[in-house]
Amino acid sequence: MDLIDLRCFQAVVQYGGITRAAEALHRVPSNISTRIRLLEEDLQAKLFVREGKRMQLSPQGTVLLDYANRLLQLAQEARGALHDDAPRGILRLGAMESTAAIRLPTLLALMHQQFPVLSVELSTGAPRPLTARVIAGELDAALVSEPVSDPRLSSQQAYVENLVMIAPAGHPAVRSARDVRLDALLVFDPDCPHRQRLEAWCAKGKVAPHKLIELGSYHAILGCCVAGMGVALIPAAVLDTYTERVHLSVYPLTGNARTMKIMLIWRKDAPQPKIHALAQLLAGKTASVGTESTSQKRSKLVH
């Protein structure tokens, strides 16, 4: 059973016979007859009751007609979707946890408002596995930290995150790794770019932390920091909604360690209207490197 057979079957029903169906489809009647016969053989069912030159739908034919109409309609929609510039379907998007938590709620709400027929399936993870899933075609796009070097990928800057050191309230000012007075670093798993940036910052200051405490969320990191268990490096925007911020000391970093670019990535050979729509929304929301978040402005006053 293929779509051509179903279209011939549908036309015979629609036009009331082989000859008129053949005229409508610009085929010879024998071709239509052959298609109907092969379809009946394939389904092992009589689709028509033949009364002279008239063809009446059989009970099995009536059942098939409903399916045929739906299948042919879906096929027409599929062809149209391939050449439709309107974002639709499901956007399989990956993002780091910090980006998903602090950046995506507003963005996804805006996407839903502007593209109501587009749905989003969100997966969170570290940049390396997210990138691998985009390359493998498991995700349409992902928001990951720089750098993006794989030649199979296209990328666009989405956000610039300002990074800050957090420590328990009362901790002395942190200007370099040597100023840290606690032995433990509060971190995510080794693939986390903020952990990698923090470890590189410590190495540059020739400081080796005595302990790494791996945690699974920013709320856990913030809570452990308030409890005096260690220090952490996080995006400043994470602090904007944290209600216990008064119990933290917050210090902006300097130099190249201060900011981290978040990039939207997708396969070069798989451009899609839904990815283009996301890229356009992000282009209108890209932050400037020189723009400080509310949290970073406040951090200068909290020690």
Image: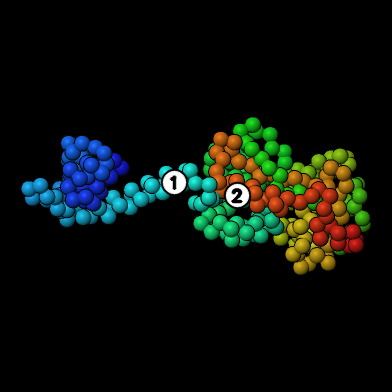
Q: Position of residue 296 (x, y in %)?
A: 84, 57
Residue 120 numbered tag: none
Residue 297 picture location, percent across and down? 86, 59
Q: Residue furthest top?
A: 151
Pick the front one: 261 or 271: 271
Q: Amino acid at mark 2?
A: Ala
Q: Looking at the image, is mark 2 or mark 1 nearer the viewer?
A: 1
Q: What residue is shown with label 1?
A: 80
Q: Residue furthest left?
A: 52
Q: Residue at x 83, y 62 (%)?
A: 248
**The disc labelled 1 sits on which kind of residue?**
Gly
Residue 173, given in percent of the width and then of the height, sits at 92, 55
What residue did someone put label 2 on? Answer: 277
56 vs 32: above or below = below
Quadrant containing the C terminus in the rendered view:
bottom right
Element carrying mark 1: helix
